[in-house]
Image (tube, rainbow, N blue to C red):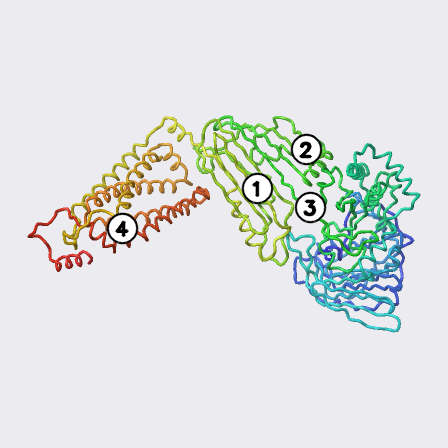
Amino acid sequence: MFLLRSFLSIGLLFFSLTILGQNHPQVTQAPEPGWTVPSNLPVEADINNDPTAGFYYLLVDNQDNLATDQEYRRLSYKIKNSMGSQQMSDLAVNFNPTYQHVEIHFINIIREGKTIDKLDLDKIKVVQRESGMEDNIYNGQLTIISHLTDIRIDDIIDFSYTITGSNPLFKGKYTTAFALQYNVPVEFHRYIIVAPKKDEIHIKKLHGAEKPRIEEYENEIHYSWTGQKLEQSTIEANTPVWFDDTPSVFVSQFSSWQEVSELLLPYYTINDQEKTQLKTEVNQLIKNTKDQKDFIEKSIRFVQDEVRYLGLENGLNSYVPRKPQEVLERRFGDCKDKSFLLSEILQTRGIKAKPILVHSFNGRNLKSYLPSPHLFDHCVVQIQLENQETYYIDPTISEQGGNLETIYFPDYRMGLLLSQDSNGLLDLPTPKVYPISINETFELLEIGGGAKLDVVSVYEGNAADLRRQQFLNTNFQALQQDYSNYYTSLYPSIYTKEALSFEDNREKNTFKVIESYQIDEFWSPSSENVNIIVARFYPLALEPQLYPQQSGKRKSPYHLEKDSNVQHNTIVYFPKAWNIQDDKRSFGDQYFQYNSDVSYKNATLKITHDYTTLSDHVAPEDITSFLTEHSKIQTQLNYWLQYNPEALIASEKNSISWIAVIFLWFILIGSGVICYLIYSKYDFPSKVKPKYERKIGGWLILIGIGLALTPLILLFRISTSNYFESSVWISLFSNTDTISMGLILIAEMIFNSVYFVFSIFVVILFFQRRTIAPRMIIALYAGVLILSALITFTALYLHPNSFTGSQTQELYSDLSIMVIRCLIFIPYFLYSERVEETFTKRKKEPTDQDEYSNEEILEHEEVLIN
């Protein structure tokens, strides 16, 4: 996209214009140069496979002649609908009047096989657009504009021109880069480079670009690339600006990056007299420095803050900086001017400082390209101290904080050092990421009433620089309004309690913003139950990170802000105690990490969200899982407090739910009756003769202790539970979202009640050594496992967000212990001889006449089994 985004932009864009008039001396009409290779216009072609597209290209013909220093261009496109007519009825050609002139060959409209001549120099305007004016950049380029009239659907617009001249700074060295696929469909494309035989040319193909066709003539060589029926190249949403997989070609006559550095280095040098003059002025400007680092820091602040950024980059000035003395006098300059000035200021004290050429966003790709001065759009400074400590400074960033060690330097990745020692591209440091801390403190004045909100936002590093610039360059009243409006989506009744304020520690580079608000109507009715009111806490500052742009299957990487580390902390002070469970959750992968923590203590709720990006992009194959993880986070971002007045009244009165009490007694009595029937009716003889019977001993003693403690534990659990609180049942069954949880609570109460009665029953059987005891114990272990698992999994499935991570882990641990208990003790009670010889008693012991023979015992066992 580095190439794709800058190609075929011939439709007129409206910027601030300076009209220079018609008949500009450097814009003339002339025939096509004789050296060009003629092209045929495929007027009958119809390649538009997108019915919504306004136009498509029939011919894109680019030809460069190195010997004559000319660029020939012919563009032909067909209008398909009114949108295409609107977009493409104005022709625009850019050129630099300092060293270029333009010859227009023809402007034709082909309609129904007839050619209509539209070239009229008297109707062509030459304007100075200055598209970068809002960024304080003036490049001095002129734009030739031709407003075509009477353009109709299915018209073919065909025009060509030649630009003669190139920047003399490059001393005839030719470089170019072009794509072989574009952001619009193209029927026929051609790029020809005509070079003298004596010239050495380097060619590099990227992303599957084809080799050129090479044709040798007597004095020149033609390098040509052609393509037919080129499909449109699309840019997927949220693709990083540095990513470009378009088939592309780089051509350069520079043999190395060192050669580029040597070409530009003389322009970043001043003579001894100029150095002396500069040193005198610097001594007057930068005084009272404690040491070398103090001088460096004050010099940086001076160039950043007192020399404003303004780029007058017309002609040679697009690559050549102005002299430091001139920049000091004007007190403005572009990136080259400011970097050159800072370097020379530091050199007046013997500090080694050199400018570095970088690209603002495409630095990671520079090694993939051929050496060229055109590949840089920015300039910064390298500072080397005597102890070899190296620092990098961007002089164009104003109001930066920190010291020499901590001052923020953007992630430019690579750069070209302008020095005699330069031997290629230089790796640049990765900036340190500092967290942004948003701290919200709510004081609930009363349950159901209003609240106070205080917000303290702490910024460090680059975030502090940006926030400092915002506060210095924005009307304060407008800032106050923006900040207060920020929370209105959450709390419509919010208003400012105290004026917005800030604390700026530029030395440590921290910037603190302090806000204070009043929320009269903090609570609102629940959307599902008008009898319940709710309060919402939501990390609004994390929305840009936690709601990434959606994307389906894709081919290109997915952009992330790598320096994103936001900590959102919410503290809520309650007027009285509240029932809140702690919770911790984590999500993440190789691209991000998110942690949340909810804790409650001493009527204070703390909610923390911490999000950090770990990369500046997501690989295409991982985008689905990346977005899925964020979807999981989104479901639990809101934290709600629910307040039910009826439940509160019941709680305050310590109201007992007599329905629950009666229901519990009904379960206990019913369970007791069933156990009694089993106790009295279910019996079978022992296989063991009396002389072989054994008392309870060995492992059975430990089992007996465990069984004896079970009813006591269950009695404590039931008595301390909330089964009998009216407020609990009112709260659960007054909201449709919690009815299922109420049913689960009923199931839990039935289970614990039956478990309690049955455990007493088993203890009686155990210590009476009844023959049915082993089977009842097995039934107890197995039944508890099955019912516990059923209740647990149902609760986790229906209400996954009601359990913290530690609670869920505890539930699974309890189930695991039950499984292990069953695996150990059920086989033990089934097959142990000790068990068989211990549990031999029946409800009614047989007399001697009632003794069973072994055959009878076996027969009885078969009957029981069947």
- The disc placed on residue 479 is 2
Kind of residue indicated by mark 4: Ile
Where 444 falls versus 420 (above or below)?
above
Answer with left or right where residue 350 lies relative to residue 713: right
Q: Are marks 1 and 3 in contact (CB under 8 Å)?
A: no
Amino acid on which disc 1 is placed: Asp
Q: Examine the image and state in which quarter residue 473 appears.
A: top right
Q: Looking at the image, tell me whether mark 3 or mark 2 is earlier in sequence order.
A: 3
Q: Residues within 10 Å of mark 3 (few under 14, many from 20)?
A: some
- Please tell me whether mark 2 sits on a helix, a strand or a loop: helix
Q: Amino acid at mark 3?
A: Pro
Name the side, left or right, on which 395 lies relative to 555.
Answer: right
Q: Could you tell which of marks 3 and 4 lies nearer the N-terminus?
A: 3
Give the CA distance from mark 3 to mark 4.
Answer: 65 Å
Residue 60's spot in the image, x, y percent? 77, 63
Question: In the rendered structure, which disc, 4 or 2, sits on the residue that comes first in sequence?
Answer: 2
Residue 297 appears at what percent x and percent y? 77, 38
Closer to the observer: label 1 or label 4?
Answer: 4
Q: CA distance from mark 2 to mark 1?
A: 26 Å
Q: Which residue is mark 1?
A: 610
Q: Which residue is mark 3?
A: 431
**Residue projecting furthest to the right:** 273
Q: CA distance from mark 1 to mark 4?
A: 49 Å
Q: CA distance from mark 3 to mark 2?
A: 29 Å
Instruction: Tell me if mark 2 has few (under 14), some (14-19) or many (20+) residues whose alpha carbon lies within 10 angstroms of its own.
Output: some
Q: Nearer the viewer, residue 171 or 165?
A: 171
Q: Secondary structure at mark 1?
A: strand
Does 59 appear above or below 562? below
Q: Is residue 97 above or below residue 203?
A: above
Residue beneath disc 4: 778
